Amino acid sequence: MESTLSDGIADLHTHTTASDGTIGVGERVGLAREQGLDAIAITDHDVVSEEFTERYGRSEGVEVVTGVEIRGDLFDTKIELLGYYVDPTDDGLQSLLSRVRTYRRKRNAQILDEVSRETGLDVSPEMLRDDDDAILGRPHIAEYLVEQGVVSSIGAAFDEFLGSDGSCFVPMERVSHDEVVSTIQEAGGVASLAHPGRIREPVSRVEEMVKELSEAGLDGIETWYPYGDVRSDEYAGLTVDDAFALADEHDLLKTGGSDCHGPRSNKFRLGNVKVPASAFEAIRERAGEYRILK
């Protein structure tokens, strides 16, 4: 199996307006069909869209995998874990997601307090998202800062205010990695480590993390991902091929996706990364082992 980004049938990392994406599920499916994708996974941050009642479905000829992306903690470092084919009605999953969203709301309130103090803007969560149940994230705050003319771009908002070195950054409480993995699996889902090359640790430390996660029962690792050619001292800087090697070393499934957030975002890249049919079928088979897929 080659580590080509563009050859394949499925994009298994996308976001919608349920979290920090710019379009809803229906429009996302339409774009996937236009891209010739056979399948996509909707992996919103810390929430499963209310549109989903089953572990997967079909729309416009596209298989739509019910997924989620959950922030976890490992070695006092933030990681993100993807869940594929999760049961959205699972009580354990919903309980965990509710707890994580509480952490996020608490952090958002603190960030907005800092933003108000730094910029003089009077800003509240209600001003940024109309739906009280919608997930508010730092990208929404960044967009607001651009709209108000405080900064020229979303990137500048993160650099000056919202990133880890920004003046308004606030760390967020996190759930342990093993609890996230087990909760995803108990909900019938396949658990995969998202974008290991975007973990804020040296490569050697990320390798230790993958070993620890594997021992905790992790199913897969996101190998195909659009890292681009730019490396940063801020991240581990693992490449797609590095992730392939880690997957093989620990006998993990290979997953992947574009991490597309939609039009008008700086991550509008649906279908730029595609998972081959053989890898997608392996993920499907693993999900079937946890709970039968009809």
Image (cartoon, helix red, strand yellow):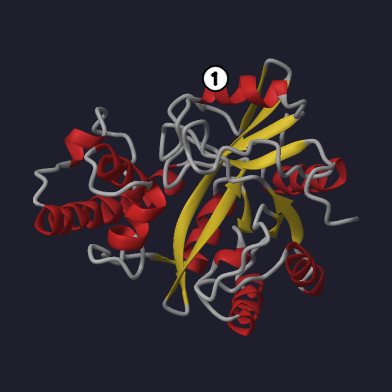
- Residue 140 image offset from top left, x and y in percent: 32, 42
Quarter of the figure with residue 2: bottom right
Image quadrant where one finds the N terminus: bottom right
Residue 118 is drawn in which quadrant?
A: bottom left
Residue drawn where x is 23% and y is 48% of the image: 150
- 185 on left or right of 2: left
Q: Residue furthest top?
A: 60
Q: Secondary structure at mark 1?
A: helix
Instruction: Pinpoint residue 223: horizontal percent, then vertical percent.
Output: 72, 58
Q: Nearer the viewer, residue 99 or 74?
A: 74
Q: Is residue 86 left or right of residue 122?
A: right
Occupied quadrant, residue 241: bottom right
Residue in view at x 15 percent, y 42 percent: 124
The answer to whether residue 231 is above or below residue 69 is below
Q: Residues within 10 Å of mark 1 (few under 14, many from 20)?
A: few
Residue ID at (59%, 74%) = 236
Which residue is at the front of the view, 248 or 178?
A: 248
The answer to whether 114 appears left or right of 8 in the picture is left
Q: Position of residue 7 (x, y in %)?
A: 84, 42
Foreground residue among 196 and 46: 196
Residue 215 in the image, given as x and y percentages of width and height = 65, 75
Tag 1 residue:
26
Given the image, on which type of amino acid does mark 1 rest? Gly
Q: Which residue extends farthest right?
A: 1
Q: Which quarter shows the C terminus?
A: top right
- Number of labels in the image equals 1
Residue at image location 83% in from the left, 44% down from the top? 276
